[in-house]
Amino acid sequence: MPDDSRTSRFDLIVALFMALAAVGTAWAGFESAKWSGVQANSYASAGADRAEASRATTLASQQRAIDVVSFTAWLNALNAEIVADPSVRPNGTYTPDTKMVSGFLFERFRPEFRPAVDAWLATHPLIDPDAPATPFDLPQYRLAADQRAQHLVDRAEKLSATARAANQRSDNYVLTAVVFATVLFFSGMATKANGRRIQLFFTVLAGIALLGCIVTLALFPVEI
């Protein structure tokens, strides 16, 4: 009778180990799939941001080219007017005259470009050789498209980091599922082994592996 009772308790413990291992395996598989989804979504969003950043960079390049061409045309027109009539030479300041070609061009600078031009003219570049060579050297020359491109690149990098972390977490859950499989293996061996010592050996191995998996799962981040 005591042997039957001991056998019954042993079978119950092994069955409990196997049940917990089965549940743990299912949970690990579920979480692995969820984190794989996070990885895929994050990489997709990062790719979309990089594509948008590329378009913003292209736009910024086009706007910069427009600014350079318009600024060069304005300088050429102003120089031509000075050569034609030296009396119009600015004395350190410049006031656009819309009746003149230079004034016409000046009034048509892009709104983003005007603050840099105004800051440049404030340094009296037309008479001061130490003034900045062009407005493009000044911090006032900022393009919203450039800033948007940088913001998108930064966000894409963060999303890629999230995707890499999600991939690692998915792999960790897969590894835990593999260890749960060893719990099932040891539990099965315990039920088939002959001799109490061998059964106890496999049962202890199953218990240690199961406890390690449960603790590990408790420490892993959960994605629902």
Image (cartoon, helix red, strand yellow):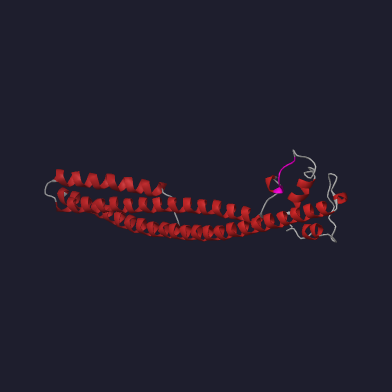
The residue at 17%/53% (across/down) is 191
On the image, which quarter does residue 64 sit in? bottom right
Q: Position of residue 161 (x, y in %)?
A: 47, 50
In the image, farthest residue toward the top: 130
Q: Is residue 135 left or right of residue 163?
A: right
In the image, farthest residue toward the left: 194
Residue 12 visible to an observer of this rendering: no
The residue at 52%/57% (across/down) is 50
Q: Is residue 201 left or right of residue 54?
A: left
Q: Position of residue 24 (x, y in %)?
A: 33, 55
State the count of labels. Answer: 0
In the image, farthest residue toward the front: 84
Q: Is residue 151 left or right of residue 23?
A: right
Q: Position of residue 96 (x, y in %)?
A: 83, 55
Q: Position of residue 120 (x, y in %)?
A: 76, 46
Q: Nearer the viewer, residue 186 or 200?
A: 186
Magenta portion: prevailing SS class = loop
Q: Nearer the viewer, residue 194 or 39?
A: 39
Q: Based on the picture, tell me whether residue 213 belongs to the magenta stretch.
A: no
Q: Which residues are magenta?
A: 131-135
Residue 61 visible to an observer of this rendering: yes
Q: Nearer the viewer, residue 215 or 86?
A: 86
The residue at 36%/57% (across/down) is 27
- In the rendered image, the vertical position of residue 160 relative to residue 133, given as above or below: below
Q: Nearer the viewer, residue 109 or 71?
A: 71
